[in-house]
Amino acid sequence: MDNAVAELTHDRDRLGRSSTAERVADILRDRIAEGLFAPGQRLSEEAIGAALGVSRNTLREAFRLLGHERLLEHRLNRGVFVRVLSAEDVADLYRVRRVIEGAAVRHSPDAAPGAFAAIRETVAEARRAAQEDRWQDVGTANIHFHQALVALNGSPRLDETMRQLLAELRLVFHVMENPREFHEPFVARNAELLELMESGRAEEAGRALEAYLDDAEKLLVRAYTPRS
Amino acid sequence: MDNAVAELTHDRDRLGRSSTAERVADILRDRIAEGLFAPGQRLSEEAIGAALGVSRNTLREAFRLLGHERLLEHRLNRGVFVRVLSAEDVADLYRVRRVIEGAAVRHSPDAAPGAFAAIRETVAEARRAAQEDRWQDVGTANIHFHQALVALNGSPRLDETMRQLLAELRLVFHVMENPREFHEPFVARNAELLELMESGRAEEAGRALEAYLDDAEKLLVRAYTPRS
DNA sequence: CTTGTCGAATTGTTGAACAATACTTATGTT
DNA sequence: AACATAAGTATTGTTCAACAATTCGACAAG
């Protein structure tokens, strides 16, 4: 078979992937991530369906998608609400991060040779943003750092799990009224963590990550005391 | 407050959780798990909708649910198909298991005091089933063992991830034409693993688990060579 | 044997309708 | 006035029917 044709196999999934429901889900996911829809807010089928110009049935399919990603909470006969994370949820998210990111760091010596390049890029991205006082973007770069970190595991499923986990965490990040205070300290720590891994000190990097996540969780929980 | 009343709190979520779409998803999930729907098979909206007596719209909501759980594959304008796992998928599933179950074993010393009771029960369950030649049930008990193992992490999200992961794996288990040969050896190994953990030898247990998962993966991949 | 065209079958999406449930407001009782 | 009850309204849950869009196989033409 022609080799050029075989190349196309990789692009196959980019063809069909666009049903209305999924595109609606993408839009809503973005809006939730950027905080336009606040946690606890109810999403009316009629209002949003009208605003986006889609039928209620299609919209409900999109809601199911996002409900499964834990960004929306579906209460029977009451509607869907933007998820409100409890303090236990935050604790659990960091528990999962310790497991998944911890495994990535411990296995970093076995990772693909050029696998650190992507991480290094996110560090640079964060530094650029910090230089220019774009603290929101620093937060985004920070998220990219951890996503790239998990990629060391070489597991598509763990990548996907991490993606959803970080999307959930973003629901909480919005409570930080001072993004600089929250994100700035981690720019340097990201770089340190990368350096430890690149020099093969995986054990040490593992401990640094533990401390890293402990600190981040504490900062977050302190600022986050939901009324309940 | 009355204590008996407080007990009911745990059952609360079982009350509202019964939309038709979710119940349909539960049914289909079971059918897929037991192999009634073979991997690769297409699920016709019309046929299944008629068989279950639900409308196409409701059925489509259920399909979205299961698609997100990776049990169904949604191909645009083509319909939904029971997922066909590739060899890479199997490898990835075991990659995730090493991470999640490995973390559970390593942290077993910190686990709640009575947390091993549930695991011990699954071991007994497997022994009973093996005694009576119910090898299908041995497989089920085996799954329960690993689910209980992950519960040592104390993380609802990891529990849920494991649940979905094992559901995916069941798609593959059906290729084992001889369930006894596949499941029997692991009954004893489950018990050994438990014993290592209960006696506090977490490090040793971690290595045992690695070997355990390596062997299981090899057995599975050997029997599983999908046409592709 | 490849390519173009047609047509049947299935999915994608919509809009309307009605039932079931939750929320709100009004009503009546103590 | 406080509280329980009842009626009314709004919203979700589900179905149905219709049509557009797409896939796929069959068949004809080159």
Image (cartoon, coloured by chain):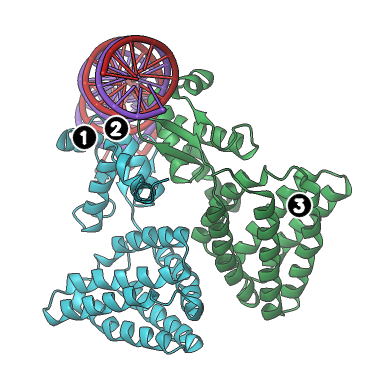
Chain colours: A cyan, B green, C purple, D red
Circle 2 crowding by C-alpha within 10 Å: few under 14, some 14–19, many from 20: some
Residue A178: which quarter of the image?
A: bottom left
Residue at 37% x, 40% y: name it. Answer: A64
Q: Which mark is residue A49?
A: 1
Q: Are marks 1 and 2 in contact (CB under 8 Å)?
A: yes
Which comes sooner in the sequence, label 1 or label 2?
A: 1
Q: What residue sits right under mark 3 in the picture?
A: B182
Amino acid residing under circle 1? Gly
**Dot 1: element:** helix
Which label is found at residue A58? 2
Q: Nearer the viewer, mark 2 or mark 3?
A: 3
Q: Residue at x 37, y 88 (%)?
A: A195
Give amino acid for label 2.
Answer: Thr
Residue neighbourhood size for the residue with mark 3, other residues' Cα within 10 Å, grouped as few (<14), some (14–19), many (≥20): some
Q: Please state which of residues A52 and B39 is positioned toward the viewer in this rendering.
A: B39
Of the residues shown, which amino acid type is indicated by label 3?
A: Phe
